[in-house]
Image (tube, rainbow, N blue to C red):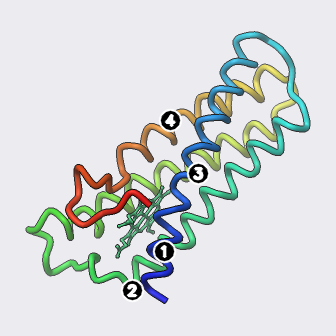
Amino acid sequence: MYPGLVHAHSGLRWVALVLLLVSVIVAIGKWQGNSGYTDGNRKLYLFTLIAVHTQLVLGLILYFISPKVNFSMMSEKLYRFYSVEHITGMLIAIVLITIGYSRSKRATDAVTKQRLVGIFYGLGLLLILASIPWPFRIPGAGWF
Ligand code: HEM
């Protein structure tokens, strides 16, 4: 089960990243162009939220079973990264994205709806990019 979960969590990063990038581009474009809010936009932002929340669920399971989460090895970069840095960065990013989605949903005018997604999803995307264990940064991490 463990290798399968790592592969699912690792591969789903690309789905989450692509959806986040498209959401941010669409939301900022429509916010700046003052060009409305469609049902397609709502679905895109919802699928993005679901992809990110799925990563949260997979990540939480991994957090309890992964040998890379080890609080007695905190002097080593790899263990510190997975035990503290990865989870902290990702949790903050997921909270930001969730706040953006729900505030945008409650907003009544189109410009505010797009602005909230553009800003909160944008900040979340930056934080996720910074917290991913890219292979050039973290030994043993994969691309997929
Ligand atoms: C959008 C959010 C997230 C993304 C994009 C993401 C992405 C990744 C990636 C790419 C890996 C490396 C897999 C590999 O070695 O190939 C990884 C590993 C890991 N992630 Fe996440 N992650 C996210 C959220 C989380 C959260 C919220 C947690 C904890 C609650 C978490 C816990 C872990 C753990 C424990 C590992 C190490 C798995 C192992 O190799 O043993 N992740 N994550």
Q: Position of residue 124 (x, y in %)?
A: 51, 42
Q: In the shown orientation, is residue 85 left or right of residue 107?
A: left
Cα–Cα span, label 2 and label 1: 9 Å
Q: Earlier in the sequence, mark 1 or mark 3?
A: 3
Q: Residues within 10 Å of mark 4 (few under 14, many from 20)?
A: some
Q: Position of residue 49 (x, y in %)?
A: 68, 52
Element class at badge 4 = helix
Q: Amino acid at mark 4?
A: Leu
Q: Nearer the viewer, mark 4 or mark 2?
A: 2
Q: Nearer the viewer, mark 3 or mark 4?
A: 3
Q: Earlier in the sequence, mark 2 or mark 1?
A: 1
Residue at coordinates 24% horizontally, 66% vertically from top-left? Answer: 140
Please report contact status of discs 1 and 3: CB closer than 8 Å, yes or no: no
CA gap between label 4 and label 2 equals 29 Å
Can you give x and y, in whole percent of width and height, for residue 138 in the image?
Answer: 23, 58
Image position of 31 with respect to 6: above or below? above
Residue pointed to by mark 3: 16
Classify mark 2 as within 8 Å of ligand 1 or not, answering yes or no.
Answer: yes
- Residue that label 4 marks: 123
Query: Outermost residue, left direction?
Result: 75
The amino acid beneath tag 3 is: Ala
**Disc number at residue 65?**
2
Residue at figure coordinates x 78%, y 19% from the top left: 111
Q: Is the C terminus in the top left, top right, bottom left or bottom right quadrant? A: bottom left
Q: What amino acid type is highlighted by mark number 1?
A: Leu
- Above or below: residue 60 compared with residue 50: below
Residue at which label 1 appears:
60
Compared to residue 44, the image places residue 139 above or below, namely: below
> Could you tell me which residue is drawn at 32 percent across and 56 percent down?
133
**Pointer 1 residue Cβ closer than 8 Å to ligand 1:** yes
Front residue of 93/12: it is 12
